[in-house]
Image (cartoon, rainbow, N blue to C red):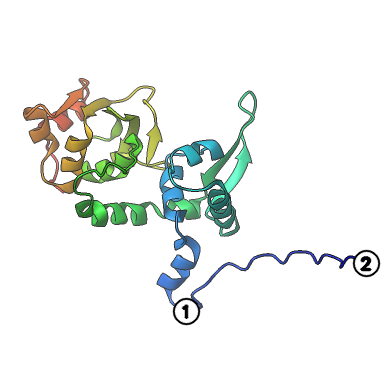
Amino acid sequence: MPRQQQPARPARRRSYDQFCATARALDSVGDRWTLLIVRELLAGPRRYTDLHADLPGVSTDVLASRLKDMEQGGLAVRRRLPPPAAAAVYELTEHGRGLLPVISALARWGAPALGERRPTDAVRAHWFALPLLRALDGLSHGGVVEVRLPEGEFHIRTGTEAVGEAYGYGPAGSPDACLVLDADAAMALTRGGTTLAEAVEDGSAKVLGDTPLAEELRGGQYPRV
C-alpha cells in the first residue's frame, strides 16, 4: 500500500539570528539577486517577464522565489493592472522604496570596481540611472531629464521632482531637458572624474532643451561629486 504523502512544510527563511539592525536588514535583502530586483523596481511597476529580461543570469525559479520572499517581507506587492493591460506587475512598497539610498550608496562604492567592460558583461541603459541621479545632485532647478544612450533611454527626476519613483524606463513624455551621451561618458560622470559642463565642452555629452534646467546642465553650476 503506497505511503500517504505528507504535505510539504513551508520553507523557513534563513536568518542570521543576531539582534543587530544590519543582520536584520540582511535577513530581508541579503540573498543573491534581491537588491538587483529592488534596483529594477525603483523605476516603477514591472511585469515578471520584463524583470527576467533585465536580470540576465537569473533563473526563473530563483526570480520567482525572490519575488515571493519580497512580498512576504513587505518589500513588494503583486497586483493586476486594469484593462486593457490586464497584466500582473510587481512594485515596491513604501518600505521597499526606502532602499533607494542603500542601492545608491552601493553603486557609488562599487563604481571604482567597474574598470573596463568585460566581454561577458551585460548592460542596460537604465543601470546608469541611479549613478547619474547622484552625479546631478545639487541642481537648483528640478525637473525630468531624459537620458539617451546607445543602449537605450530612461529618464530621471531631479530636485523637488525626485519624489516616489527615482527614475523611469524609456523616454519621458515631456522632459525638461535631454542628455545625450554614451556609456563611457556616463561612467566618467558617475565616478566624478568630470563634470557635465566639461563633457558638453569636449563633445562627449550633449544637452538638448531651452529650459532653466537644461541651461543649468550645460553650465554645470552644481557641485562636483
Badge 1 amino acid: Gln
Mark 2 neighbour density, 10 Å: few (under 14) some (14–19) many (20 or more)? few
149 sits to left or right of 78: left
- Mark toward the start of the polypeptide (1 vs 2): 2
Judge left or right: residue 32 versus residue 47: left
Describe residue 223's horizontal placement relative to residue 16 as left or right. left
Q: Identify residue for label 1.
A: 18
Residue at position x 34%, y 54% from top? 101
Q: Which residue corresponds to the image point at 29% horizontal and 52% vertical from the top-left?
A: 107
Up/down of 141 relative to 65, above or below: above
Q: Residue furthest front?
A: 1
Which secondary structure lies at badge 1? loop
Q: Is residue 168 visible?
A: yes
The residue type indicated by label 2 comes to Met
Nearest the camera: 22 or 7? Answer: 7
Q: Is residue 34 above or below residue 57?
A: below
- Number of numbered tags placed on the structure image: 2
Compared to residue 147, the image places residue 8 above or below, namely: below
Which residue is drawn at the image coordinates 14% and 41% (left, top)?
222
Q: Is residue 138 visible?
A: no
Quadrant containing the N terminus in the rendered view: bottom right
Foreground pick, 169 / 10: 10
State the image coordinates of residue 10 (x, y, percent, origin top left).
69, 65
Q: Which residue in the protein does label 2 denote?
A: 1
Residue found at x 37% / y 26%: 172
For residue 4, which quarter of the picture? Answer: bottom right
129, 144: nearer the viewer: 129
Q: Position of residue 124 (x, y in %)?
A: 35, 37
Extreme residue in the right direction: 1
Q: Quadrant of residue 187?
A: top left
Name which quarter of the figure residue 136 lies in.
top left
Judging from the image, what secondary structure is the residue with disc 2 in? loop
